[in-house]
Amino acid sequence: MSLKPKPGRREFVKWGLASAGVPLVSEALGGLGVAKAEPADTPGGERGGTTVSLGSGIQMYYKEEWLGAPWLNGEPAVLLHGNLETHEIWYGWVPRMAQQFRLFRPDLPGFGRSTAPRDFEWSLANFAKLVGNFLDAIGVASAHIIGAKTGGAIAMQFAATYPQRTRTLVVASGPFSSVAPGNDNNSQQVRLGSLAGKEEMAYFDKLRDEMKPETRQGVGKMMSNFNLESLLPRISAPTLVITSDHSALQSVETVLRYQPKIPHSRLLVLTSDAYHVAVANANECVTNVLAFIRETKQQP
């Protein structure tokens, strides 16, 4: 089926899913330390998060949110951010997602308030292992794993390595293979899309500028030398892959080369010129993620 110029969102999504042969979405490092509460981020502002020790000089900072009924305990969902940012990028997901799931938003090792030792191994396999150690530290056996950008690649690695700990998997604009060096220097307009305002782009520029040099160097090397293709068939969890139709950094055709290799996966193509759909199209992403998880739970 040929793609018409500038199709409507519904037509484009159906085209992408039909091409992929999938249905439309709508139809252990060292000893673990004791968690330590952090003070409020700002006076009278957002409540502070918690830090847990994963051993070997790694301290993981995270925020936990549950906005459901206080007598209930929502299923856990772990949200993994991308490169050059922190747990804060999931702000648009919290209000609705936390009403149905207990959200854990960590700063990955080396990012934000989380630490990494000088001899840290910058690899997807090590990050996936540390996500598992993080789940152990917070007492979670399995969770819904959601990742954006580099966090999406880590999420796929985790799901392939720890299938029994992955309830569902969501990948929002995550790369499947090596990213060219210098990609982190792209403008925020390219990352966030043409609808991003000056204040938003300045905020993400600030996050990039505050990134630790060793983290930026380590992640850059990691992202320029990996390929998940051989791992994709090992992902057994129900999976939703989200991408956009006009991103300058990741084409739909590129995603279609990899996504069908994930056995129980679906593709959602959003009408957007942003690469970072988890931020630029947060509300639309959440609507589809909630529907996707709800549907997978109804299946026998």
Image (cartoon, rainbow, N blue to C red):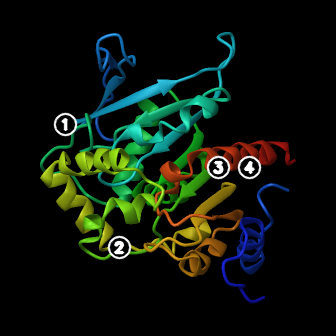
Q: Which numbered marker is on residue 57?
A: 1
Q: Nearer the viewer, mark 2 or mark 1?
A: 2
Q: CA distance from mark 4 to mark 3?
A: 12 Å
Q: For marks 3 and 1, give the one nearer the viewer.
A: 3
Reading the image, the residue beneath label 4 is 292
- Amino acid type at circle 3 is Glu
Return the mark for residue 284. Answer: 3
Quarter of the image containing the N terminus? bottom right
Element under disc 2? loop
Say what amino acid the circle numbered 4 marks. Phe
- What residue is shown at x 47% (from left), y 63% (from top)? 275
Label 3 secondary element: helix
> Which disc is residue 290 wearing?
none
Alpha carbons under labels 2 and 4: distance apart? 28 Å
Q: Which residue is mark 2?
A: 179
In the rendered structure, which disc, 2 or 3, sits on the residue that comes first in sequence? 2
Q: Is residue 125 left or right of residue 9?
A: left
Q: Of marks 2 and 4, which one's residue comes earlier in the chain?
A: 2
**Label 4 element class:** helix
69 or 33, nearer to the observer? 69
